[in-house]
Amino acid sequence: MSKKFDYLIVGAGLFGTIFAREAALKGKRSLIIDKRDHIAGNIYTKEVEGIQVHEYGAHIFHTSDKEVWDYVNRFAEFNRYTNSPVARYKDELYNLPFNMNTFHALWGVKTPAEAKAKIAEQTAQAREIVANPENPANVEEQALLLAGRDIYEKLVKGYTEKQWGKRATELPAFIIKRLPFRFTYDNNYFNDKYQGIPVGGYTKLVERILTDDIPEGMIEVRLSTDFFDNRDELTESAEKIVYTGPVDAFFDYEFGNLEFRSLRFETELLDEENYQGNAVVNYTEYEVPYTRIIEHKHFEYGTQEKTVVTREYPATWKMGDEPYYPVNDERNNSLYAKYKEKADAQQNVIFGGRLGRYKYYDMHQVVAEALKAAESALK
Ligand SMILES: Cc1cc2nc3c(=O)[nH]c(=O)nc-3n(C[C@H](O)[C@H](O)[C@H](O)COP(=O)(O)OP(=O)(O)OC[C@H]3O[C@@H](n4cnc5c(N)ncnc54)[C@H](O)[C@@H]3O)c2cc1C
C-alpha cells in the first residue's frame, strides 16, 4: 500500500523546510513535524511592539556563496545590516573584530605599523613567560602568544571563560586556533561578500519557503509534535525520513549522549527608544554573568518608541535542555563517528542540519547542505 507522504521531515528549521520545498517542487509530498509550537527552528523571530525579536539568539545572515544568497533573497528582501559588535570591558568600549579602532582605543596607536609593533612587543613578552611556547598548555597561554596580554585580558579571557564555563587555564589550547587581526579601520565582523537581515523577520522567510509556488497539499506542517512520542506511526506514514533532530536521540543514545553547550536568554521590553546604540554588545569581563546584550531593533534600523533587549547567558547543558553548540572535542567527535556510521547505514533516513550532523553550521551552510541533500535524494 502506498504511503500518505513521500517524506516525513523531523524539524521545521532551515534544513527541513528547504528540503520539503525542493521535494514539493519535484512532486513529492512531505509531512513536517516539530516539537516546538512554531516553524523556523532556531532562526525563529517573533514580533514584539513592531520589533523582530530573535528568540534563539542573534542571527545575521552572511555568505560569499552567490547561489545561496540568491536563493534566500527569493523569499525575503535583505536589509544592509552589517555586524559590528562592540565589546565592553568594565567601563571601556572597544570595536570588534580586532582592528585599528580597537588598537587605537587600547594603546593610542594610529598607524598599522604602530599597531603591529605593539602586538609584536606583547607577544614577545608572552613567549618569555610561557613555559613551552611551541606547545601552549591551555587557552591562556595560547591567547597570550597570539595576541599579547592587553587583548587577552581585556577582550578574550573573561568572555571565553563564560562561554565555556571554565577558567582559561583549564581550557585546552585548541579552542582558540587563531585571533584574526585587521589592520584597517573596518568594524565589519564578517569577511563575507553578502550580509543582511531579512526584512519582516526570519519566520516570514521560512513561511515563504514553505508556500511560494508550492501547490496546495504538498507540504503539511504539524507543530507541537515530538517524533519520539509517536515514532512508529509517524515512520509508517512516509516512504522516507529527513531527520534534523539530535542524531544520538534517533539511536536511543546507544553509545551514550553527545554533549552540547546551552544558552539561557533573558528578554525584556523597555520603555525607552534606544538602550545601547548597537545591536550587539559583548561583555568581556568575567564578573558580568552574561556574554552579550542584543538590542533587536538595531538589526533592522527600527524607530519604534520602545525597545527589546536580550541578555545571553552561557549554560552547561544537561539532558532535556535546548542543545545549541556541539562540543567537538575528542570524546564527542569519536562518539559522533560511531553514530554517523549507523546513520550512513540507514537506507531510508537522511540526517541533516546542525543536530543531525552534530556540527556547528551557520545558516548559509545549512541552506547549501539542504539543497545538496535534496538534489541528491530527488534526482
Ligand atoms: C545562539 C546562536 C546564534 C547563531 N547565530 C547565527 C548567525 O548569526 N548567523 C548564522 O548564519 N547562523 C547562526 N547560528 C546558526 C543557525 O541557528 C543554524 O545554522 C540553523 O538554525 C540550523 O538550522 P537547522 O534546520 O539545522 O536546525 P534547527 O533550526 O535547530 O532545527 C531543528 C528543529 O528540529 C526540531 N526537533 C528536534 N528534535 C525533534 C523531535 N524529536 N521531534 C520533532 N522536532 C524535533 C527542533 O525543535 C528544531 O526546530 C546561530 C546559532 C545559535 C545557537
Image (cartoon, rainbow, N blue to C red):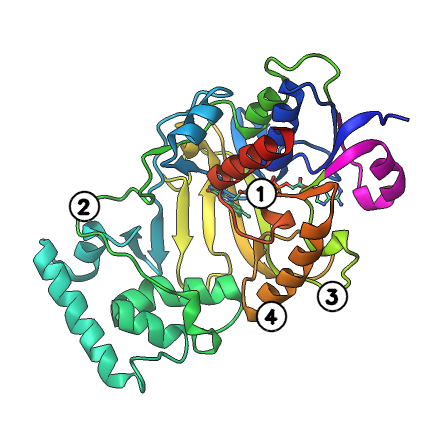
Give the vertical position of 379 relative to 230 (above or below): above
Q: Which residue is identified by label 1?
A: 56
For the record, the magenta segment spans 220-241
Q: Please name the amino acid that badge 4 sits on.
A: Arg
Amino acid on which the number 1 mark rests in the picture: Tyr
* Furthest-front residue in this view: 379
Pointer 1 with pointer 2, Cβ within 8 A: no
Which residue is rendered at x = 72% and y = 12% of the image? 216
Is 223 placed left or right of 356 in the picture? right
Secondary structure, mark 3, is loop
Name the amino acid type tagged 2.
Answer: Tyr
Per the image, the residue denoted by label 4 is 331
Q: Earlier in the sequence, mark 3 or mark 2?
A: 2
Neighbor class of circle 2 (other Cα within 10 Å; few <14, some 14-19, many 20+) is some
The mark closer to the camera, 4 or 2, is: 4
Pointer 3 and pointer 2: residues touching (CB < 8 Å)? no
User: Is residue 113 in view from this perspective?
Assistant: yes
x then y, percent, for residue 166: 51, 71
- Dividing the image into four quarters, tell me where ligand 1 lies: top right
Q: Secondary structure at mark 1?
A: loop
Query: Which of the two discs, 3 and 4, labels the residue nearer the N terminus?
Result: 3
Give the percent coordinates (x, y) of residue 301. 39, 28
Please name whichever residue, 303 or 159, is drawn nearer the observer in this view of the structure: 159
Q: Is residue 377 magenta?
A: no
Q: Are marks 3 and 1 in contact (CB under 8 Å)?
A: no
Instruction: Please report whichever mark, 4 or 1, sits nearer to the chain's N-terminal start.
Output: 1
CA gap between label 4 and label 1 equals 27 Å
